[in-house]
Amino acid sequence: MAKTAGDHAIGTGDLKGVAPEHTYAGALSFLRCRYRDDPAGVEVAVTGVPLDTATTNRPGARFGPRGVRAASATMAWTRPYGWEFDPREVLAVADLGDCAFDPFHPAGVPAEIEAHAARLLDAGCRLLTLGGDHFVSYPLLKAHAARHGPLSLLHFDAHSDTWAGDEAGDVNHGTMFWHAAREGLIDVEHSLQVGLRTHNDDTLGIPILDAPWVHAHGVAAVVERARSLLAGRRVYLTFDIDCLDPAFAPGTGTPVAGGLSTAQALAILKGLRGLDLVGADVVEVAPAYDSAEITALAGAHIGFELLALFACRPGGPMPADWP
């Protein structure tokens, strides 16, 4: 049996690989990946944005990055189930810690998040961001679009987040994609929203597969539609944990009954391999409302799947046994 090491996150300089470690102890980086403050040489940077002042219901998502990191320790010993490789063996992945911002001057926070993301992108990283409430996707999209141009948005959520916002700008987790569409950050005709189950009559032209549609047509149909819209395009994927039914993700600020199961979500993500994923986030995990960490665990599993998608994007480093 392999000797169990401790604190792999701070005890090794290697950005690739997996080491045996107790799941109940040690420094809690995401999936025990190396902690770094220097993004040089990092291909995928995991970073947290602990903001929850844009919520319209229950706050608490500021603790989401910490909760998802802690939950991820239980799965750090092996590759994500159903994949032929471990993305941590293929990619140089590091946990770059959390974005620092001044919560006492909230008007400046969006620019601070955008600058944090831009610094990592300029260093050559792809970003897997852990929220925080869903507003954080807006400054993240701005940073990614500045580098890549208009992006296709793949959005998993119970809510559209396209309600009309303040023309002068607002910090609201329900208006970000209204702003993103108006500013040309996203290509609305080649974006997709999955899992919605709250009303907003103005879709802004974004195609929608709502939760009842997903339940009626199944995972394969969702994957087929997503691939037809997004293949060959640069994609930013955002996963609001309330896309999942509250039975699978009670620990969130605005839960809505009738959502996807964790199994459905993971199967859909597995079907997206090969898309050009330029950035991704998992948001709205609020541990204070969780039960037995099941929401944080779902967020961690989703994050692991996203790492695997980064590893098999076009032009990226491919595993040696890739079929």
Image: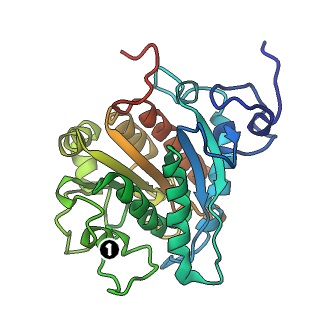
Residue 101: percent from the left, percent from the top? 63, 71
Do we see residue 122 in this rendering?
yes
Q: Residue at x 39, y 83 (%)?
A: 169
Q: Reply above or below: 174 against 122.
A: below
Decide which of 245, 32 is in the foreground and name it: 32
Residue 252 appears in view: no
Q: Residue at x 62, y 51 (%)?
A: 68
Would you place residue 22 above or below residue 112 in this image?
Answer: above
Q: Which residue is mark 1?
A: 179
Disc tally is 1
Q: Quadrant of the N terminus?
A: top right
**x, y (%) of residue 287?**
64, 61
Q: Nearer the viewer, residue 41 or 35?
A: 41
Examine the rendered structure and indicate whether residue 108 appears above or below residue 28.
below
Residue name at image x 67 percent, y 26 percent: 18
In the picture, measured across the screen, residue 88 lies left or right of residue 180, that is right
Q: Quadrant of the C terminus?
A: top left
